[in-house]
Amino acid sequence: MIRVPLRPLARVIAARNQGIDPDVVDAERRAAACRLRRAEETRRAQRRLWLLSAVFVMGFGAVAGKMAVISASDVPQQEQSATADPLRAHRADIVDVNGELLATNIVTSALYVETRRMVDPEGVAIGLANIFPDLEAEALMTLFARPGNFHWIQSQVSPEQLQAVHDLGQPGVFYGPRETRVYPQGRRLGHILGGSRFEREAARAAETAGTAGVELMFNERLGDPERIDEPLRLSIDLRAQNAMRDVLAQQMERFDAIGATGILMRADNGEIVSMVSLPDFDPNDRPAPRGPDADQLFSRASQGVYELGSTFKTLTVAQSLELGLVNPETMIDTRGPLQWGRFRIRDFHNYGPELSVTEVMEHSSNIGTARIALDIGIERHQEFLRELGFFDPVEVELPESRSARPLLPPRWSDLSTMTISYGHGLAATPLHLASAYATVANGGLRVTPTLLADAAMPTEADRVISERTSGMVNRMLRAVVSDGTAGFADVEGYEVGGKTGTADKPSQGGYAEDRVIATFAAVFPASDPEYVLVVTLDEPEDRSGPVVRRTAGWTAAPTAGMIIRRVAPVLGLRPQSRQSDPEIPGMALAGGRG
């Protein structure tokens, strides 16, 4: 039996008194109560819906925010920059004076792993070790076990290697794009360009920075985003560079020398057309500074400090001519040996009681040059060499050269002046010598060596000697080749002038008897020099005859002649008639040691 709840009696009586059916009143009451319940339920549902919407909005907002942060940030880097600067992934090209490419970028890939995403670390290690010969599986496993999720594997990966990595099918192995610096000429410009490396790396880019040479000197210029499309143009002529390196390598092997240097410079403004130092290195695979091939990084041209022998006689004679102390025909006492305290200065041969200044140059007389230097005096001699740049490092665009300071005598005496006058007692780089010869040969205006094309010309403010003195010196240099110790440097049609220099190498507080630095400093054409060439061979030995010959006349001079024969046509110099030149004696080299 279902019990029906009773209606309130008071409401029934009140309805009847008003003549209203109590059932209608009760139905209206129930309808009103139902509406109130529905309204409350609607409000409750709306509140729940708004709350749920807010939760969904907050959740999806957090996810979207995290995705935005991830997309706008790099994968953790191996190297964090100390600054907030963006990575400069691009770098300007370097070209030679004719626009030939010397350094550029190519797109490659870098390989890295995220260990948290790996499924089979051991399989990854074995697979990568099989692809990259320089990697070992055990070393990779040790790397994967280190703290952190992100680890670099290879900075540069070839397309073939990248495909092999893809074929592994291993999760957790990733690659990022790179612009890798490459040097198409390889070893031929190693000491000039220097090389580069990745300085800052991220997963999607890496910033390249120079490590030495022109790359380091012009690091900011090459990485400037506003000048990326503007190549850095050097004064180097790649054709001359290739020719010089080929000749030096050939002659270095022929004379069993331990090193060789060649510098070709424009005489008028000091632009370096070619500069070679052997042994050299490939900047694409730069040796470690302390590795077994570290000696290849040393540039004999701009860093090597040597006594350069009788090539200094040209500078001594030039100063004496400028001061009016001598002229080319002045007779100089060459009786020897020249005694100075307990020291004796000798000549390679006995040249008789006296020689003219020109003959002192031709026969390379130490005694004659020492007497000329004594008349100049210590202070004037020092000042002249200072003007020519022998007291400071060479100001060339190579950071390494800044440490190559000439070695000067601790106490500059009369004896120092005499020995330095013929190239002993002061050590400098071959680049110092090339600059000095360009100054003396170009009419007397000091030049500063440069590796940049379109260098400024010197002005009268740079004058060191007069044009008249320069002309006399050039004629003497020509005589040294046509009649003196440098006959093997003569090249038909190119009027070569120059001076030989053979310096014993220092050894245990003295000088070695069988090891020399052989140097030849040349100008051509001698009547109006356009180029200066300095060639240096370290410990050369000519064993083609019955006795071993080490002097520059037999080693450096013929090497210079071979270089001029190769590069002069490349530089646009046309051979001239030699009708006015005297015949070169067959045994001209026997005159002196040089």
Image (spheres, rainbow, N blue to C red):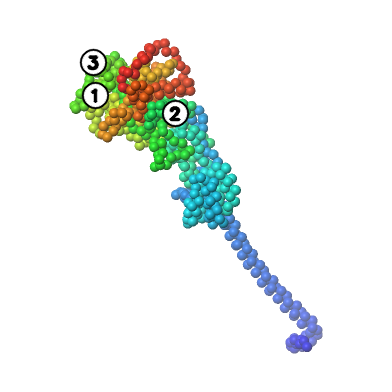
Q: Is residue 49 above or below residue 232?
A: below
Disc marking residue 245: 2
Decide which of 507, 403 is in the foreground and name it.
507
Q: Residues within 10 Å of mark 1 (few under 14, many from 20)?
A: some
Relative horizontal placement of residue 591, taking residue 136 as reference (left or right): left
x 30%, y 26%: residue: 423
Residue 578: quarter of image = top left
Q: Residues within 10 Å of mark 2 (few under 14, many from 20)?
A: many
**Residue linked to disc 1:** 345
Q: Amino acid at mark 1?
A: Ile
One can see residue 582 in this view: yes
Q: Quadrant of the C terminus?
A: top left
Q: Count of labels shown?
A: 3
Q: Return the disc, 2 or 1, that comes first in the chain's sequence.
A: 2
Q: Which residue is mark 3?
A: 353
Q: Residue 357 placed where, x, y %? A: 29, 17
Q: Residues within 10 Å of mark 3 (few under 14, many from 20)?
A: few
The three-letter code of the residue at mark 3 reads Pro
Q: At label 2, which amino acid type do we have?
A: Arg
Q: Are marks 2 and 3 in contact (CB under 8 Å)?
A: no
Query: In the picture, which quadrant includes the N terminus?
Result: bottom right
Report x, y in % for residue 448: 38, 29
Q: Image check: 11 left or right of 197?
A: right
